[in-house]
Image (cartoon, rainbow, N blue to C red):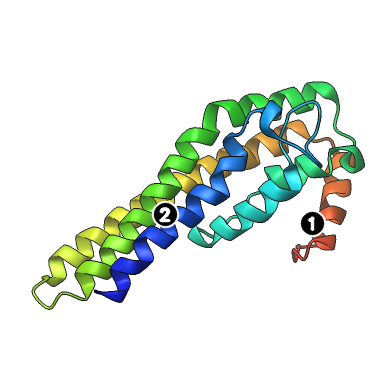
Amino acid sequence: MNPVSLNWPRCLAAVVLCVLPLLASSSEQQGAASASDGIDWEVARQRMSMLSQMGFHPFLMPLIMENRDAIGLENEQIKTFRAWRSKNRVPLIHTMNEIIRARAEFQRIALNPKTREEVLYAKQEEIFRLHRKVLKYQLSCRRNILDTFDNEQWDNFRFILTENGYVLDE
């Protein structure tokens, strides 16, 4: 059996395992899950970081929600972020799954000597299109954060970012 085709089920399983906690209801969450939103944001942040290899922009919302008290978020701001998540989470995850599928397919067809270069270029363009779609969601989330934070909250979040290994401009 082709080793590349063996990776596809493993990749899909990894994505499913990574995404399920993000989709879980509050009654299914235990441990460090917030009583107010039912998501264990530490687990979500770890799993989104595994998926972030699909693009360059970091997934910020799990880190923000995990540190909402240190940032000083108000209830209205949390509601704003939850509304964004409710609207965009499922389509974002769907697009990320499409990227995984398209990458696996690209690898499979790239190893076939009968595949023409034009087909590979077209498949790569499809993957780029999907990456742009993910970036659009990420930039929408970023805009939501920038429009919602005040200066003090932004300073608090910058501190949290540096504590989590992000390198920031001055």
Does residue 50 appear to the left or right of 46 in the view shown? left
User: In which quadrant of the rendered image does the C terminus lie?
Assistant: bottom right
Does residue 125 appear to the left or right of 163 in the view shown? left
* Location of residue 101 in the rendering, given as x and y in whole percent from the top left corner: 34, 54
Q: Residue furthest left?
A: 114
Residue pointed to by mark 1: 161
Q: Disc 2 vs disc 1: which is toward the camera?
A: 2
* Location of residue 45 in the rendering, given as x and y in whole percent from the top left corner: 69, 50
Name above or below for residue 124 compared with residue 73: below
Q: Residue at x 79, y 43 (%)?
A: 66
Does residue 25 appear to the left or right of 152 in the view shown? left
Q: Residue at x 48, y 40 (%)?
A: 92
For label 2, the crowd category at 10 Å Cα-Cα, with few meaning under 14, some 14 to 19 and many 20 or more, is: some
Does any portion of residue 58 appear in the rendered image? no
Residue pointed to by mark 2: 12
Residue 113 is marked as: none
Q: Is disc 1 placed on a helix, strand or loop?
A: helix
Q: How many marks?
A: 2
